[in-house]
DNA sequence: CCATAGGATTCATCAGATGAATATGGATGC
DNA sequence: GCATCCATATTCATCTGATGAATCCTATGG
């Protein structure tokens, strides 16, 4: 079936040759001849630049060019940051998307967590508390990001993972809440503790509930209707 | 806050000049001078090609180049189709993403539907039934796509909309179910009728439930755990 | 055997030229 | 006066060729 072809000759060539991530691509001058009728270097360069922008190839002098590992993030990152640079308020849309995604894939992710993951999350919790209560108070942004991404680490869906990764990149770039008061951040980590404890005790529902409540702290409040409504499905549980 | 800068000089320039969608950009030779120190035309061209691939600008001879309307879809499309061309099975991941998104934003979308929208959906239902029962049986792919996208037409979230649009583009390209038996497609549209009737009567929960059941017909079954678990939240409804 | 220096390879960027597509404006006819 | 058609100029599309910088490879000397 399928037989999908892309606009880019270069990408089609990469696909056709079945290069694996990490593989070295031919040099530019080789690419000109190989597989297409005398294309100029400039044209190859244009397509290379697109592939590079999408995070598909790593292109550096002499090393040849290497095919990168699969990731959905760079393309989304590029597009989102263009939107954010034009109007930061677009972050709110992406924030809503992220909240719904985490809510929606919550159990699937939680069930894949290992003991190491949980310990790692405990580490972030401790580190965050330390930053918030230390002599020189610092906001634990990195820990916040790491805590949430760890929950979804083993989720078997590169697209969802990519979107979540980009969310945190945007979160850092937009610098929301950077100047929020201390109590806000303390509340956030109180919720994180509730989430982690619930996960550790295997009660993913409680963890999810804590997560949903915790999102209400965000300046950019997600609309919670569907969380509630989806929840309303329980009573007459979806029939097999 | 913010102060987000991109790698691309061209994109930064576009942002800085605050061009609106539809606006004509300077010509390539003008861009070389304007705002950056003597950049070669080839370099401008590379960045233009990236912007074009992302669906940001429409670039044609003589017209100058026009800034396109905001859309998240092209970037996602490009990246997804590269993945699909390498391995069609990636569709399954995107399919799961789509199901969770529709489930998760269901009520928010339904509440924005107008009478016209519902009539339009009724039209797709009739057309689909007609295709399935006609002399020369045809599979109503276009109606399937239109039916679902109409539900989310007024959803105020360009990112979610973009992802859903791309899903249907991929759905058409991958040609899944094209050769599925007739009864499968008839069942699909029976569910659609249930969904639409429920929406028209204002019972969005029932519509959502029908939607979730209807996704089980897909070859690529979404994991329904989180739907159920999210549902489990009802009983002890999330506290304000 | 190892370290360093020089050469070769390859990307990065530029300059300039030609061809093709299209909008503009003027000439023509009604 | 208005519409239509054609020539021309503008602008993108692509190519050729050249130079510089970064990196790897190799040879040379200790």
Image (cartoon, coloured by chain):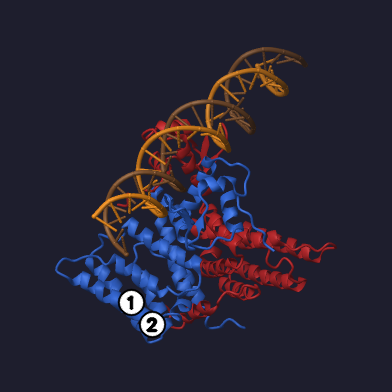
Chain colours: A blue, B red, C brown, D orange
Instruction: Name which of mark 2 and mark 1 comes first in the sequence.
Output: 1
Q: Work out whether residue C11 or residue B18 is closer to the camera in this orientation and state it.
A: C11
In this picture, residue B149 sits left or right of residue B1:
right
Q: Work out whether residue A161 or residue A9 is closer to the camera in this orientation and state it.
A: A9
The residue at which mark 1 appears reads as A121
Q: Position of residue A188 (x, y in %)?
A: 30, 71
Residue furthest to the bottom in view is A201
| Placement of C6 over or under A91, stated as above or below | above
In this picture, residue B196 sits left or right of residue A139:
right
Q: Work out whether residue B141 or residue B189 is closer to the camera in this orientation and state it.
A: B141
Q: Position of residue A115 (x, y in %)?
A: 37, 83
Residue furthest to the left in view is A135
From the image, which quarter does the C terminus of chain A lie in? bottom right
The answer to whether one can see residue B113 in this image is: no
Q: Position of residue A16 (x, y in %)?
A: 61, 57
Q: Nearer the viewer, mark 2 or mark 1?
A: 1
* Residues at marks 2 and 1, CA–CA distance in whole angstroms: 10 Å
Q: Mark 1, chain letter?
A: A
The answer to whether one can see residue A125 in this image is: yes
Looking at the image, which residue is at 64% across and 57% down?
A4
The residue at which mark 2 appears reads as A199
């Amino acid at each position: 079936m399928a037989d999908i072809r892309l606009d880019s000759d270069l990408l089609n060539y990469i696909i056709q040759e079945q290069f694996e991530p990490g593989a070295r691509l031919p040099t530019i001058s080789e690419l000109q001849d190989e597989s297409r009728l005398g294309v100029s270097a400039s044209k190859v360069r244009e397509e290379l630049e697109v592939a590079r922008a999408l995070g598909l190839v790593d292109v550096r002098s002499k090393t040849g060019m290497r095919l990168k590992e699969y990731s959905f993030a760079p393309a989304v990152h590029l597009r989102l940051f263009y939107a954010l640079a034009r109007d930061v308020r677009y972050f709110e849309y992406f924030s809503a998307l992220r909240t719904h995604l985490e809510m929606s894939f919550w159990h699937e992710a939680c069930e894949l967590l290992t003991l190491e993951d949980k310990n790692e999350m405990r580490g972030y919790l401790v580190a965050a508390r330390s930053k918030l209560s230390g002599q020189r108070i610092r906001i634990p942004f990195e820990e916040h990001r790491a805590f949430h991404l760890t929950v979804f680490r083993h989720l078997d869906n590169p697209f969802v993972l990519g979107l979540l990764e980009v969310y945190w990149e945007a979160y850092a770039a937009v610098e929301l809440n950077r100047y929020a008061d201390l109590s806000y951040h303390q509340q956030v980590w109180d919720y994180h503790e509730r989430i982690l404890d619930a996960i550790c005790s295997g009660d993913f529902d409680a963890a999810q509930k804590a997560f949903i409540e915790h999102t209400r702290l965000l300046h950019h409040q997600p609309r919670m209707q569907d969380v509630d409504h989806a929840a309303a499905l329980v009573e007459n549980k979806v029939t097999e």
